[in-house]
Amino acid sequence: MQLRQVRVWDLGVRGFHWGLVICVAIGAVTGFLAGRDWLGIHVIAGSTIAALLIFRLIWGWLGSRYALFQSFPLSLRAVRHHLSPAGRGEHHLGHNPLGAVMVYALIGVLALILLTGAVALGGVVKQGPLAFLMSFATGIQARSLHNALAIGLLVMIAAHLGGVVLESWRGRQNLARAMVTGLKESAEAPQSAPVAGHPWIAGLAVAVAAAVLVPGTLALNALPGRGVPPPALDAAYVRECGGCHFAYPPSLAPAQTWVAVMDGLDDHFGENATIDSATATVLRGWLADNSSEHWDTRPAVTLRTTDPAQPQRITAAPAWTRFHRRIAEAVFKSQAVGAKGSCGACHHDASTGRFDPQQIAIPAKAFQ
């Protein structure tokens, strides 16, 4: 039987496959191994995966023969036959029944990972197209599901790689190389080669999708996040408090903390910080109206629980201690940082009360 090289995987399928491999690898590394300041790269990887999935759905409708979803329908009966002794000798140019199951499963799981990631990003970090809608509590729940799905994806990838090795051995074909070259060996007649796709129509469909989704996503991104405090602080507060130390946004502590602070200005952590009564009255009201109970950001929610022994010290809160547990005491005492309360030294957006992960940068001199 004479074998011939048949082009099975077109450029669209191969580009999608290897692009997905790269982006999933970046997403896994930045999600499981890297610090919170890598969130921006993680989001870029996820956004690229979303674009790749949209392209694959379009190409599965308009692509060449073996790229079309109709060429590898989901069939559990076909899977059972493929795994049986009777199916061992059958040759599949495109996806075999087991590969088809994996393709649909991967697309479905990736779609769920993207959805839960967007919900978590919007609720926990108050970023992305769903930030205007999602609460912190919903974001935390979505993040747990997102992480579980990501672990499941890694298991599926391991199973996929094992399947590639097994099917390469069973079918005497190098499936990994075929996904690079697009070519497989086949004894089938030339007319069974893949029919031409519709690249111009597919390109138009991709352009239309981009024209709708990109501006829509950007418009949603521009909406104020749910429960995010306004970035500007009261001018009198900045003048009176910021003149001696970092002016903590009121969303970082509950109202009872701010009441205690204002009541004890004559002995403010060992200093007399008394201000005139009129200004004190205004600031007392402003602090109470903008305390953590009124906002839904991660700092606002987590820092509501104070240290009973030091309720007025934000840096003593259990959540603050947990967030900074890996930072050496020497870093806080360094000249570049100054103290635990010098939030602006490492968080470039500290004055807004957001504390976005992408805005974290510990000064290099702090480690010297």
Image: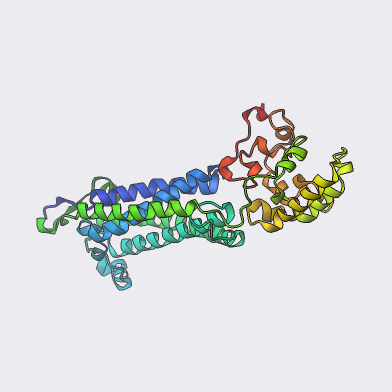
Residue at image x 40%, y 62%? Answer: 108
State the residue lying farthest toward the front: 278
Image quadrant in which you'd find residue 350? top right
- Decide which of 350, 336 is in the foreground and name it: 350
Image quadrant in which you'd find residue 335? top right
Q: Is residue 113 left or right of residue 317?
A: left
The picture places residue 239, in percent across and down from the top left corner, at 74, 38
Residue 124 seen: yes
- Decide which of 141, 14 is in the foreground and name it: 141
The picture places residue 146, in percent across and down from the top left corner, at 52, 58
- Decide which of 175, 129 is in the foreground and name it: 129
Residue at image x 39%, y 59%? Answer: 106
Q: How is the image coloured?
A: rainbow
The picture places residue 48, in percent across and down from the top left corner, at 40, 49
Q: Is residue 128 left or right of residue 75?
A: right
* Quadrant of image for the N terminus: bottom left
Residue at image x 34%, y 47%? Answer: 18
* Quadrant of image for the C terminus: top right
Number of marks in the image? 0
State the residue lying farthest toward the bottom: 77
The picture places residue 181, in percent across and down from the top left corner, at 24, 45
Residue 164 seen: no
Position of residue 100 relative to residue 310, above or below, is below
Position of residue 116 relative to residue 345, above or below, is below
Position of residue 192 relative to residue 353, above or below, is below
